[in-house]
Image (cartoon, helix red, strand yellow):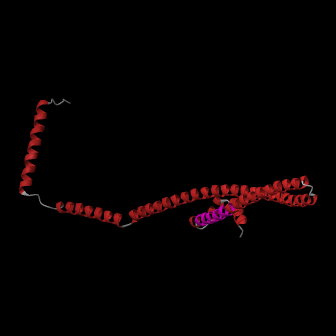
Amino acid sequence: MGIFTRFRDIVNSNINSMLDQAEDPEKLIRLMIQEMEDTLIEMKASCAGAIAARKKSGRAFEASKARVTDWTAKAELAISKGREDLAREALLEKRRYSETLVALETEAQQLDDVVGQYQGDILQLEDKLTKAREKQRSLVQRHIHAQKKTAAQQQIRKAGSGDAVLRFEQFENRIERLEAEADLVNIGRRPSLEEQFTKLVADEEIEKELAALKAKTPIPSH
């Protein structure tokens, strides 16, 4: 595929659309960037070659222009010396260099156009490459975020159904069993002698308080 064909394909491509349809967007964007970088290198090399050719053409133009001036002077000299034959030969050489000047001028204009086209294309391609690299950075960040989010979700699912919850439930069940066992210990147990006397003292104190309340509180008559 020629450099200009590749350039047109790259510049006309819709990066977002291509990435949306790709199975592996990160791999595709890497390949696209590599293709752009390779094409850019080739275009810059070709542009440099065109610039060198333009300079060479310019030097040839100036040399031919000098030769036209030189042969014009020689023709004038020959006429002044009565050498019409030499003047004619000089004018023929002048014409030949004049024709070369026209060809070189056309070539220089064409090379200027080529260099200008290369420079414009290079700017377009560099802009496209910058956007592709920005897209790559965005994809990488999204990938990292997605990986972290996936890892977090996995941890949540693991915590929701894994060993941690199971151990907590086992601990909770153990506490409930211990509480139940403690309740069972007191069921049907005969109070100790000390406990019975403690209850009698408490009951006697209640009776005293009740009697005191009755004594100072008038009882309504019926």
Q: Main secondary structure of the magenta part?
A: helix
Q: Residue furthest front?
A: 81
| The stretch drawn in magenta includes residue 42 | yes
Front-most of 47 and 109?
A: 109
Identify the residue shown where x is 67% and y is 55%. 124
How far across and down, in percent of the image, does residue 159 sit? 38, 63
Residue 194: within the magenta? no
Quadrant including the N terminus: bottom right
Say left or right for 195 vs 121.
Answer: left
Residue positioned 75% across, 56% down in the render: 112
Choose top left, top right, bottom left or bottom right for residue 181. Answer: bottom left
Q: Residue 128, image x and y in percent? A: 64, 57
Q: Position of residue 191 (x, y in %)?
A: 11, 57
Of residues 183 and 163, which is closer to you in this image? Answer: 163
Task: Give the image location of residue 153, x and y in percent.
Answer: 45, 61
Find the magenta span and give its range: 28-47
* Number of numbered labels in the structure image: 0
In the rendered structure, the answer to whether residue 125 lies left or right of residue 114 reads left
**In the rendered image, which quarter contains the C terminus?**
top left
Residue drawn at (7%, 47%) of the image: 201
Quadrant of the image occupied by residue 16? bottom right
Q: Residue furthest bottom?
A: 1
- Is residue 36 found left or right of 141 in the rendered image? right
Q: Is residue 149 left or right of residue 108?
A: left
Q: Looking at the rendering, which quadrant does residue 217 occupy?
A: top left
Q: Nearer the viewer, residue 80 or 117?
A: 80
